[in-house]
Image: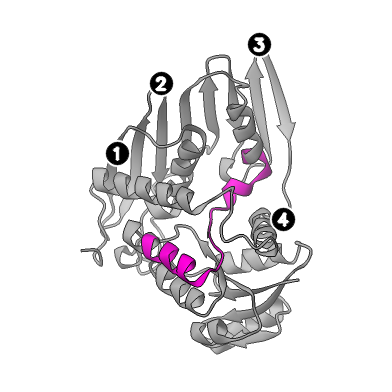
Amino acid sequence: MIRWGIVGAGKIANTFAKDLALVADNRLCAVASRSLSKAKDFAETYAADHAFGSYGELFQSDVVDVVYIATPHTSHADLSIRAMECRKHVLCEKPMGVNGAEVALMLDKARENKVFLMEALWSRFNPTIKKVKELVDAGEIGKLAYLKADFAFYGLDRDEKGRLLNPDLAGGTILDIGIYPIFLSYLLLGMPKNITAQAQFHKTGIERQTSMIFEYKDAQALLFSSLACDSEMKAEIAGSTGSLFINPRWHEAESYVLVKDGESEHIALGKMGKGYTHEIAEVAHCITAGKLESSLWSHQNTRDLCTLLDSVREEAGIHFPFEP
């Protein structure tokens, strides 16, 4: 039995807790929040035995094996490091850190304390996305030439002090939702040789939408993220002998379409729960096997993705007030 603790009691923590209950041999044992009453309510809702009114109390306890960091971006590095210093394994919500410097510190701390650490990039473990990668790697659609992926929803009516619109909380699209199309391009095409990115900004100072072109030796990826509009969120991957379409919303897809030789085939693979179940199972597998990182989403993968996020932000002029 893998004993889990959840750090933070917001929306994503609730979704995670529901999915955790679906994974055999994994159990929610504790939750921590800055509000003890909120932690107690969360623990009661999801049948956790322990509720803590501070994050440190959970880290120092002996009631959990692994913690899921479900707080805003700007606290990911600090809380993950504090947990690892207490010899807790960590699944940290994406992005792992706000920038490359934070990620480097987190990975150093994981090595130093010999604990498991993984970025919670749940789409990597989605059955449909795993299958699409297998097909691409096997040459099913020939040599890739084009990839298009977006992630957009209207969010400019949110609380300006909340995490999406507040620059002090690393708000904007890139770290929150732009990370998904960037991830897909990296997963299927690797590291680009050149990046072009242009952003538009909101009155609060956060970037409200960004268009990106990732240039590869023989391919291009067109990527987009926005808080100013909705998008179809259907990913297209085109090669020399066919195309793959990951159906909306592609980052949590349950099916894909293969178009080849004049034929179109729809394949449904489904998922368990919301889809966090698959990354939970991977963490449990790694911890049980004594692994300190996942082979499906490794420390190097996290480094590379953060490098791409940093590069996009530099190219588009996206800077947070707390950064040097």
Amino acid type, residue under disc 1 in the picture: Ala
Q: Which residue is mark 4?
A: 273
Q: Residue 284's spot in the image, x, y percent? A: 68, 62
Q: Classify residue 296 as left or right of residue 209.
A: right
Residue 317, placed above or below residue 167: above
Does the residue at mark 3 contact the one at mark 1 (Cβ under 8 Å)? no
Provide the secondary structure element on which disc 1 rests: strand
Residue 152, placed above or below residue 57: above
Sequence-wise first label, 4 or 3: 3
Sequence-wise first label, 3 or 1: 1
Amino acid type, residue under disc 3 in the picture: Gly
Quadrant that contains the C terminus? bottom left
Q: Residues within 10 Å of mark 2 (few under 14, many from 20)?
A: few
How far separated are the C-alphas under marks 3 and 2? 24 Å
Secondary structure mostly seen in magenta is: helix
Provide the secondary structure element on which disc 3 rests: loop
Q: Which residue is mark 1?
A: 197
Observer-nearest of 99 and 201: 99
How far separated are the C-alphas under marks 2 and 4? 38 Å
Does 271 appear in magenta? no
Q: Which residue is mark 2?
A: 218
Q: Which residue is mark 3?
A: 262
Q: Quadrant of residue 62?
A: bottom right
How far separated are the C-alphas under marks 4 and 3? 34 Å
Does the residue at mark 2 contact the one at mark 4 (Cβ under 8 Å)? no
Provide the secondary structure element on which disc 2 rests: loop
